[in-house]
Amino acid sequence: MAISHPEPSSVQHASAFEVVVATQDVRLHDEAKQLKQVIGKQNRPTTFIVYFGQGGVEIRRSNKADKKGHKVDFNTIDRRTGAGNLSRKQLFPKAIGNETKTVLDITAGLGADSAMLALMGYTVRAVERSPIISVLLRDGLHRANKNPELHNALGGRLALAEADSRVIMQNIDFVDVVYMDPMFPPKRKKSALPQGSIQMLQAVVGYDDDVQTKELFDLAMNTATKRVVVKRPNYAPFFRENPTFVHKGKLVRYEVYGAQK
Ligand SMILES: C[S@@+](CC[C@H](N)C(=O)[O-])C[C@H]1O[C@@H](n2cnc3c(N)ncnc32)[C@H](O)[C@@H]1O
């Protein structure tokens, strides 16, 4: 993964962080050093620890009682084929398209969607602008590639970039499909908070604002040669009127917009 840290001002982490290093691993030491430089000195009470340990990088709440961290672990993805999770008959690959070969994921987050697509056989470039989430992603991919079976299943089809996708899309050759999954606020602030790693992701990067998301979409329409796919919770309004197709699941839907080219 190319590391070119985006301007700190374009990232806006929603919480404050402390970096803790508890490993001798040189790769992780370098990552921790770079991350400390990018996030700088935090002038507010820290809510999270980015913990560099023997088993990789994870995010923990500073609250000592909660030692449970979140890391990126592509090994937890159910890789059964046939009618299973990785079947091209699922809604997600249907939205991406069977003829599609290359996908640019412009909101990579914790990489679950990108990894799924790579495991399904698409060639994926995943872009994430948060330096903290990017460290987790790189570490997850590094560990995935150490596992021979997972390495084989990914087939070198997943590449990561730490950058603002708006910049990447102004400098990229065309791709078949641009995929975006912007962070959308929960339906009810208190009761509908999603659990686990998505909750952590929301606490780290906050919600994506509408103006920027629209900007991402417009650039995506100029970058994709086949289509742009937007993932939305079912309670959210349609991103644009008249999507070309909609693939609706129980909780989320994939809105497909035909590309302009
Ligand atoms: C809802 S999460 C995506 C979750 C992801 N689909 C997954 O499977 O884990 C949205 C992510 O997009 C990132 N993001 C938002 N705007 C971005 C931009 N302009 N460039 C790169 N990443 C961006 C946020 O930092 C956040 O991590």
Image (cartoon, rainbow, N blue to C red):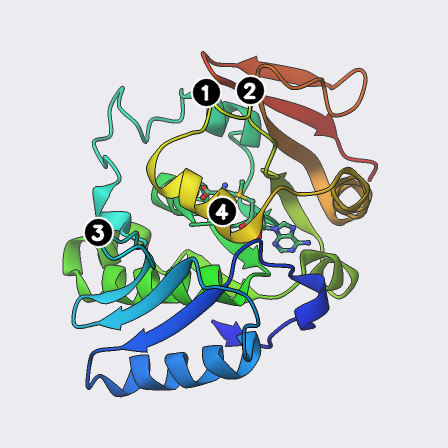
Residue 54 shows in this picture: yes
Closest to the observer: 124 or 73? 73
Q: Is residue 18 left or right of residue 56?
A: right
- Amino acid tagged 1: Ser
* Residue identified by numbered label 1: 191
- In what element is the residue under mark 2? loop
- Amino acid tagged 2: Arg
Numbered label tally: 4
- Amino acid tagged 3: Ala
Q: For the C terminus, give its image quadrant.
A: top right
* Residue identified by numbered label 2: 188
The tag earlier along the polypeptide, 2 or 3, is 3
For ligand 1, tell me if the residue under mark 1 lies within 8 Å.
no
**Number of the label disc, if any, that sits on residue 83:** none
- In what element is the residue under mark 1? loop
User: What is the x, y in percent for residue 15?
Assistant: 52, 56
Distance Cα–Cα, label 2 vs label 3: 27 Å
Q: Is residue 115 left or right of residue 11?
A: left
Q: Is residue 105 above or below residue 227?
A: below
Q: Is residue 81 above or below residue 146?
A: above
